[in-house]
Amino acid sequence: MLNAVKQSWLTFKSIFTGMGVTIRHFFGPSVTLRYPEERMELPKGARARLFVNIDDCIGCNLCARACPVNCIDIETVAATKDVDLGKTSTGNPKRFWLTRFDIDMAKCMYCDLCVHPCPTNCIYMVPEYEYSEYDRSNLVYHFSNLEPEMVAEVKEKAEQEAEQKKREREEMMRKKAEEKAKKELEEKKKADEEATKNEKENGGE
């Protein structure tokens, strides 16, 4: 009998305790958000979608190297001598065209490891978490601002300059080889003349 009364008391106590919590929240301020009209503000440092300020990117590839799942794909082309790409907002000189800067958010593991190595702070996570897609290819975000025609022109100019530098280097190496051969020939000729002179002097004795 005593045990039954004790169990009944514990049952009613737990019920009243739970109801007390419910009643306190019932009369308290509402915390429900009317999504999607209202959205919860993400806390500082929350990891969500990656964004790249392409104007501040110097094409150093540090973010792509840091990514453990290879979700960042970068292609750069060295700027030619006649082009000044300027500087970033942090004062870093820009020496490369960014012909491709893609991030595949379907592969991203939100580790934030790509953010910290960036010397210009151009890659960071934004508080955006609504980017579901039916097609996975739509989760690849393209940040390069170059048109296909511009990319082709940049690559062509870079190839021409590289070819010109190669020819100049080959010409310089050829001239150095000729100068070396000429110098060796002169040294050999001088040595032969010296040997002939010594032979004559020894023969006269």
Image (cartoon, rainbow, N blue to C red):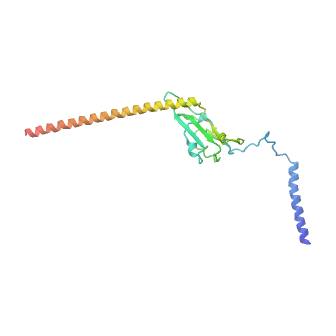
Residue 68 x, y percent position in the rendering? 59, 48
Q: Residue at x 91, y 71 (%)?
A: 2
- The N terminus appears in which quarter of the rendering? bottom right
Residue 53 quadrant:
top right
Residue 138 x, y percent position in the rendering? 66, 39
Residue 27 x, y percent position in the rendering? 88, 48
Exactly how many numbered labels are in the figure?
0
Q: Is residue 89 visible?
A: no
Residue lying furthest front: 135
Q: Residue at x 11, y 38 (%)?
A: 201
Residue 101 quadrant:
top right
Q: Residue at x 34, y 33 (%)?
A: 174
Left or right, 158 with respect to 128, comes to left
Residue lying furthest top: 82
Q: Residue at x 20, y 38 (%)?
A: 191
Q: Is residue 111 above or below residue 96?
A: below
- The C terminus appears in which quarter of the rendering? top left
Residue lying furthest left: 205
Left or right, 136 with respect to 173, comes to right
Looking at the image, which is closer to me, 8 or 150?
A: 150
Looking at the image, which is closer to me, 141 or 204?
A: 141
Q: Is residue 185 visible?
A: yes
Residue 9 x, y percent position in the rendering? 90, 65
